[in-house]
Amino acid sequence: MNGLERQFAQTVAEHKSTIYTVCYMFSQDADEVNDLFQEVLVNLWKGFESFEHRSDIRTWIYRVALNTCISIDRKKKRRSSEVRLTMDINLFEDRDEDTKQVDMLHKRISKLQPFDRAIVLLWLENLSYEEIGQIVGISTKNVSVRLFRIREQLKNMSNDYNFPIMNNDYQNTQNTQTDMELENMRQQMNTLKKKLEQQEIVNDGLMRRSMKNTAGNISRRYYLIMALCLLMIPYSYWAFVMLNGFSIPFWIFTCITMLVSFGGTYYNSRKLSDSNMMTNNLVDVRRRMARAKKFDANWLFIGIPIAIVFLGWFMYESYLLHPDAFFNGLFWAGCIGGIIGAIWGFSLHFKTQRQYQDIIDQIEDITAEQ
């Protein structure tokens, strides 16, 4: 996970209750709230790098979350996403006393129109009229007018649906009743926020995406190696046999070496499947990555002896063709090529080992948090 992704994950963790609260108030079941949560995260991620902190991060998160939820509520469509984050909680099925209070709040707010829902959510979060106006894009006066209308709607809801409140010991006017219900909603909002603050974000998806990128780098390197191995079969015949007169057995050995390299690389590349990386159990993914890392490390015990035999045979063939091979350009070209190849091969090997370890470390980070 790079620096920007870590910063994003930290920001999401700090504001998880805000994001989830907004999504919850625009949802009718647990699946819908998780879908919305993921959609909001996608849009936050898209704008995160360009966010210049000209406004408060919390204000920006509210704006993105509300715009996303309102837009989707109008379109009534969902799309899947690679950023699979959610919260390990189901407020639609939990039945403890706090969740009952939260459910009362959800029933009230879900009766409002999407835009009014956004305004009352921000008001319940104790934001000023000016802050609410900045987030939803209307004037402070318009916020005041909207909230007055919302108060009237809540008053009608109390009459029509007989919503219970925490304090029933009052016999007062309709306005006083509405004020008490609004205050009661604030208490229920605080209850919701406290429940959410106790939950951990399941950041499995974001980490999987980072792991997928790292695995993709390894896969591309493997594809390059496999392509070179296949290319070397016809090229080695032209360069060694036709051009320089090397023996057919040497060319056959070269072909076998290339095919063995191709087979080993292909075998290990199968462990880096994108679909497996994104969907399989993380314990299984870690086990597969550990095996791939070990196979890649053990490959040196095969590759180094083969390379030594190849270079030795190459020098022998050069000597047979040119007894004064020490002074022959082909001899030195082979030596220099062997040195460059060894440096390049070791560099790729150690880089691949580091990237395998990065994936394993990221999986351990996730499993340690769960």
Image (spheres, rainbow, N blue to C red):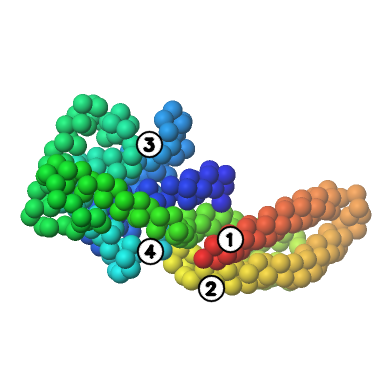
Dot in front, 2 or 4: 4
Please tell me the numbered disc located at residue 59.
Answer: 3
Q: Is residue 84 visible?
A: no
Q: Earlier in the sequence, mark 2 or mark 4?
A: 4
Viewer-proximal residue among 234 and 94: 94
Q: Amino acid at mark 3?
A: Thr
Please tell me the numbered disc located at residue 284.
Answer: 2
Q: Secondary structure at mark 1?
A: helix
For the point 38% across and 52% down, which residue is it?
Answer: 193
Please tell me the numbered disc located at residue 339.
Answer: none
Q: Earlier in the sequence, mark 3 or mark 4?
A: 3
Q: Amino acid at mark 2?
A: Asp
**In 3D space, how far apart are the residues under numbered discs 2 and 4 (Cα atoms)?**
25 Å
For the point 16% across and 57% down, which residue is it?
Answer: 163
Dot in front, 1 or 3: 3
**In 3D space, how far apart are the residues under numbered discs 4 and 1 (Cα atoms)?**
21 Å
Dot in front, 1 or 2: 1
**In 3D space, how far apart are the residues under numbered discs 1 and 2 (Cα atoms)?**
15 Å
Which residue is label 4 attached to? 89
For the point 30% across and 41% down, which residue is it?
Answer: 122
Q: Position of residue 30 (x, y in %)?
A: 29, 63
Which residue is label 1 attached to? 365
